[in-house]
Image (cartoon, helix red, strand yellow):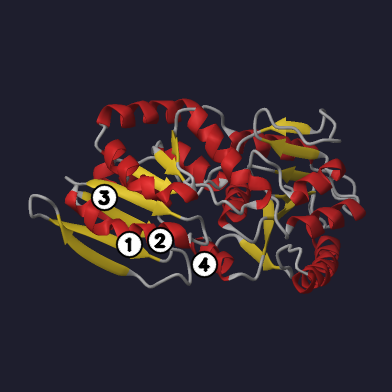
Amino acid sequence: MSRFLISCGGTGGHLSPGISIAEGLHARGHQATLLISKKKVDARLIEKYPGLRFERMPGSGFSWHPVRMARFVLSQIAALRFCMALIKSERPAAVVGFGGFTSAPAALAGRMRGIPVALHEANRVPGLAIRLLGRLADRLYLPLGIRVSGVRSSVTRHAGLPVRREIMRMPVEAARESLGLDQEQKVLVILGGSQGASALNAWARSKLEALALESIQVYCVTGLGKGDQETVVHKSKAGRPVTSVFVPFCDRVAELLSSADLVVSRAGAGTIAELIRCEVPAILVPYPHAASDHQRANASFFERQGGGLVVEESALGELLDEVVELAGNDWLLHQFRANLRRMDRSNSLDLMLTDLEAMARPDPGAPPGSPAGAPA
């Protein structure tokens, strides 16, 4: 048995793969502690996982604004001290980071304590933490075809985002029944990532009546703090009621995606991995202010692989026509689903679990003959 320290807080795109890895390690007989932020979204996401151990660490997001930059630096110093103390007490066999502001202190503390460090980047443009810390890592997991300058090829492994085992395609009828959706009408799911997207929420509300006329139901996940749960009913051209639902958060991802004929979403790597796993065609609207424009790179790759289409936020006026046309084209939706099945052939979770077991070092404080990571 080995202990692992997994740094994955700040956004759903970081926390979800961390949970996936932790569950996989537990299934193989290991222990894992997940480092998360103090943000509300982290607290909400972990509610389903009482069997996992989470530690909230100091930290705030990076910013070039002088005041927020100072806050970021001070919080990183506090986080480094926190991680150093935690590693000293837990003596993990390896530290695993999924990017974001929680990963840098954990990775640096691991390196300073002589613990192997693995980093994972799911976006097709590596983030700042990965670019800066990649040279310190013993493993760097990257999407296929992506490299980080200065990182040895022997360190790099190509692996997609490890999706939680609970997220898989289920029968559409059961998925719609669980969410209270009409079985006969088309379903459009709108996602803005774990924190929601105000532009997509506003678009959904402004187009509800037009979508209802085409017998398209809407299920919109608005994001925490961006509105309360709400149900709206309009009429189709045939006079039938068409129900649309707005919820601030949804932790039933498999049911939600499996119920959809089509998804309109931001283009975070975590969302895209879940779309692929559940074989749901999507129209991606990249967040135009994402760091290094990584969402546009993610969306372009998804479109080239045949998983759906890309519409820029500046062209939201064209989105309604795209949605109505695609939702009514069963042949094209079928082709997209076939392409998504092809994209999901690799098993990133098992690849990473096996590799992490191989790189994990025995506990230097354990007596001879003790299992790796076991307490002395």
Local packing at callout 4 (Cα closer than 10 Å; few below 14, some 14-19, many 20+) is some
Residue 375's place in the image compared with 267, above or below, is below
- Residue type, label 2: Asn
Alpha carbon separation for disc pair 2 and 1: 6 Å
Image quarter of residue 328:
top left
Q: CA distance from mark 1 to mark 3?
A: 21 Å
- Look at the numbered discs 4 and 3 and tell me whether their residues touch, using CB distance below 8 Å: no
Residue bearing the label numbered 1: 205
Mark 2 surroundings: few (<14), some (14-19) or many (≥20) residues within 10 A: many
What's under tag 1, amino acid-wise? Arg
Of 32 and 247, nearer the camera is: 247
First along the sequence among labels 1 and 3: 3
Can you tell which mark lies on residue 176? Answer: 3
* Residue 55 left/right relative to 245: right
Tell me whether the residue at label 2 lies in contact with that at label 1, contact meaning CB atoms closer than 8 angstroms. Answer: yes
- What distance separates the C-alpha of mark 4 from that of mark 3? 23 Å
Residue 133 in percent (x, y) is at: 82, 47
Q: Residues within 10 Å of mark 3 (few under 14, many from 20)?
A: some
- Quarter of the C terminus within the rendering: bottom right
* Label 2 sits on residue: 201
- Image marks 1 and 3: residues in contact by CB distance under 8 Å: no
Q: Secondary structure at mark 4?
A: helix
Lower position in the chain sequence, tag 2 or tag 4? 4
